[in-house]
Amino acid sequence: MTDLEAIGKACFALHARMTARLLSRVYDAAMRPAELRLAQFGLLGAIAHGSSTSETALAERLGLERTTLVRNLKLLEERGWIEPVAGDGRGVRHRLTEAGREKLESAVPLWEAAQRRIEEKLGEVEPEAARLALRALRKASR
């Protein structure tokens, strides 16, 4: 019989999913005063960082399915935080509105507090070492 306990202890995917869910809860709770979820905060940040990025490139950069990205973009647009902009070719691009920029700026201190909380709880694990391990897992998954 297969040793399912050993698989559960060793499986990178299971550990990554559990970790992602728990981390998302921490950051989502921190973002609540800004009426944002972590995914929305990340998307606003990505758009602010590269506002001329096409939806396809943005989905690839964030590791999202294009349909998930489009659904989230629609929500941000409905809230008045982003707007589509004309670009080269057929790809749809977005940029932050003034309201979106204000929303993002108001959420940064909330994110910083959540980040500090997690880093403090890492104990003997250096935050940069944890990030490097996560980057290595993403790279190995491509």
Image (cartoon, rainbow, N blue to C red):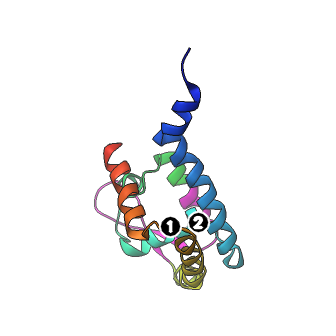
Q: Amino acid at mark 1?
A: Gly
Callouts 1 and 2 close, C-beta under 8 Å? yes
Residue 13 lies, with reference to residue 125, above or below; the image says: above
Q: Looking at this view, is 24 or 49 the one in front? A: 24
Query: Looking at the picture, how far across and down is residue 123, in whole percent?
Result: 53, 69
Which quadrant of the structure image shows residue 108? bottom right
As measured in the structure, the alpha-carbon distance from the residue carrying label 1 to the one carrying label 2 is 6 Å
Residue located 29% across and 56% down the image: 89
Magenta highlight range: 71-96
Q: Which residue is mark 1?
A: 42
Judged from the image, the secondary structure of the residue bearing numbered disc 2 is helix
Quarter of the image that includes the C terminus: top left
Q: Is residue 46 magenta?
A: no
Q: Which residue is mark 2?
A: 38
Residue located 33% across and 52% down the image: 136
Q: Is residue 77 magenta?
A: yes
Label 2 CA crowd tier, 10 Å (few <14, some 14–19, many 20+): many
Label 1 CA crowd tier, 10 Å (few <14, some 14–19, many 20+): some
Residue located 51% across and 82% down the image: 101
Query: Looking at the picture, how far across and down is residue 45, in whole percent?
Result: 46, 72
Q: Looking at this view, is 102 or 114 the one in front? A: 114
Residue 115 image label:
none
Name of the residue lying farthest toward the top: 1
Residue located 40% across and 56% down the image: 134
Judged from the image, the secondary structure of the residue bearing numbered disc 1 is helix
Q: Looking at this view, is 83 or 127 the one in front? A: 127
